[in-house]
Amino acid sequence: MSGLPPAPPGLDIYATRQPELYAAQLTTYILAVIAVGLRFWARKLLKAGYWLDDWIAVAALVVATGLFASSFVWISQGYGKHLWVLGPTFVTEFFKNLFVGEILYTLIIVLVKYSILAFYWRLFTQSIHLPVYILGGITTAWGIAVTLVTIFQCKPVSDFFEPDFTKRNCIVNDYAFFVGIAVPNILTDAALMSLPVPYIWKLHRSQSQKIALAVIFMLGSFVTIISIVRLATLVSVNITSPDLDWNFAYVGVWTITESNMAIVSGCLPSLRPILSLAMTGSPNPSAYATGNRYASGKSLKRSQNISMGSRTQPDQISESDSQHQFVPLDDETDGYSGLKNLHSTVVAGERQVPASDIEMQGLPNAPRGINVRSDVAVKWTGGGR
């Protein structure tokens, strides 16, 4: 644009929305850093290794740091002020920063979804793998589509930064693009948060414990609300106005908030050990699964024959002890999955049940002297005492 039209009558051209931008950026980024730090502390409390979902969360935080830095530069240049103060040449700077921000925002959202899916993969049984593959594919397709449209929405690409709207050759409808980004993102968020609920409901735990677990996993759904608010803000922006730097300020607030709080929501389910430590003094969530340390009223007995390979046979344990000491089935046993590290078979009635089919039982620790990584045969008595 070669010049600016006169400012609307009564408009305070010196007003600014930068305080809101700085506040959203600083507070939510700090929360994201704290959430990832607590995630790693939770794993350390359990003396468990770090797995793929943890490192993807770190990757998301690294990209969020890039968005934090670029947004800080953008605000320092004048983002959040009226264009009549900044001058018409700032339009080019606005679109350059918007271009970078859209790509970084998309990458953060994709990485957070990958981290959540990897967490589910590690935590639950093999039956969840197919839904994880499906949602992972949808997330990947969404991320690639948004990135390509962002880069190639104008021909040539440099037209995206053209300050004179009449000279821009952009083939993408802005409103359609905003809706096309936000709606699939919101739908996949809802699917991600609800995915573990049916698997939690199959656990051998009390109704109240199942509800508590489901609530923990769905705490992250608040980011879906933020996504909806961001979409409503986007579609209400007057994109035909030359004062885009001011008009898009609240879009920036919600974009920064959504990307950082997505990282927070992705970390929340992995913080159970810290909650357990605060409530019971023990980081092991299974320590308070039941009042008498029984898993769902059922006990596991060690079978009389324990195959230890070439290892030394442990001391004999009384039947009473064997009913009160259980092989741990928590996901937190190490960096992978408690049961995937056990080479054991559970006998349920007359049916052989793979250990991977009863993950997330949350049983207490095994007796001393028992090598849970050995080939151990355990028997499901189903009786409970």
Image: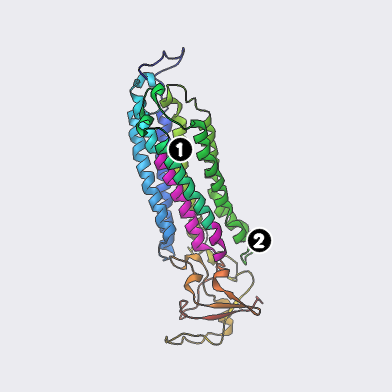
Residue placed most toward the observer, 167 or 265: 167
Mainly helix, strand or loop, the magenta region?
helix
In-image side of 174 versus 210 (left or right): left
Res 148 quadrant in image: top left
Q: What stretch is highlighted in magenta?
A: 102-131
Q: In which quarter of the image is the C terminus?
A: bottom right
> How far is disc 2 from disc 1 in space, using C-alphas?
38 Å
Identify the element where label 2 is drawn: helix
Residue 17 pos. (x, y %): 42, 27
Residue 334 pos. (x, y %): 44, 67
**Which residue position is annotated with label 2?**
207
Q: Residue at x 51, y 62 (%)?
A: 123
**Which residue position is annotated with label 1?**
255
Name which residue type carries label 1. Thr
Residue placed most toward the observer, 313 or 97: 97
Name which residue type carries label 2. Gln
**Callout in the foreground (2, 1):** 1
